[in-house]
Image (spheres, grey):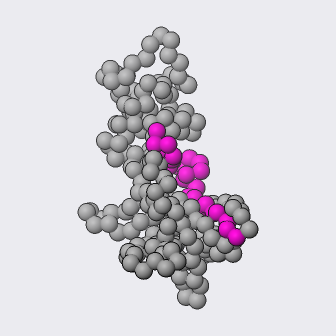
Amino acid sequence: MKFMEFKHKDIYVKVHTPLIVTREIYDGDKKQREELVYANVIDIDSRVQAVFAQFHHARKASDVSFGLRHAPRVGEKNYDKSSFYVKPVGKYKHLSQREDETFVTGIVVGEKVLERQKDGFIIFAWDGNIQEKFFWAIDRYYETPLLEEWTPYLFNQLINDNRMIPLTIHDFTGDYSELVVYDLLVGEEILDEYISYGLKTGLIVMTEDDHVKEAI
């Protein structure tokens, strides 16, 4: 478990977090920052709500960051004292649920996870079956015709062309070992081009019994 902390002038908020998902931003080979995509937090209600509130205050982007460091257990002394920072970027939504009389679980999630945005969609596969979740996402949120058996072709082409990027999972408890998250960065026009190319080259085929959502 980690502490997720927010500091700004006289404001200080700290909650426990078992899991965050981030997008790593590079300038060449040098990592510039980690952007927060998803966070699962747990603490007393007032602290969880205080974290939620930080996503609604109008501040300069340079003023907003969350520090992550080890949350020691009672009596624990020899532990990793290193830390790192993540920055919120874009719009977020949140939800909380009371676990017992003391603790509340909260989720902070970027809008791109909840619904398709103009610049793409973020796909979570909690069970590790990312190609299955990828097919469901295309079928639900995109107009591109896609048969289930074409999924490996399209998925791998997007990966190879850096148009579907794996996000970084920070599992601080070991409870999310199967989780896989990818950021799909293109819309229908590019997806249609991949499908058209696959059909023309024979990398994928369409039989007489195949049905797609619309003609290519």
Q: Residue at x 54, y 53 (%)?
A: 112
Q: Residue at x 44, y 13 (%)?
A: 207
Q: Position of residue 199 (x, y in %)?
A: 37, 22
**Would residue 117 be counted in the magenta stretch?**
yes
Q: Position of residue 143 (x, y in %)?
A: 54, 33
Query: Foreground residue, 174 or 41?
Result: 174
Q: Residue at x 50, y 16 (%)?
A: 210
* Left-right relation of 89 to 199: right
Q: Is residue 166 visible?
A: yes
**Would residue 16 be counted in the magenta stretch?**
no
Q: Position of residue 11 (x, y in %)?
A: 59, 85
Which range is magenta? 102-129
Q: Is residue 13 above or below residue 187?
A: below
Q: Is residue 65 above or below residue 201?
A: below
Determine which quarter of the picture holds residue 97: bottom right
**Farthest residue in the front direction?**
75
* Left-right relation of 126 to 199: right
* Left-right relation of 100 to 14: right
Q: Residue at x 37, y 22 (%)?
A: 204
Q: Is residue 138 visible?
A: no
Q: Position of residue 195 (x, y in %)?
A: 41, 29
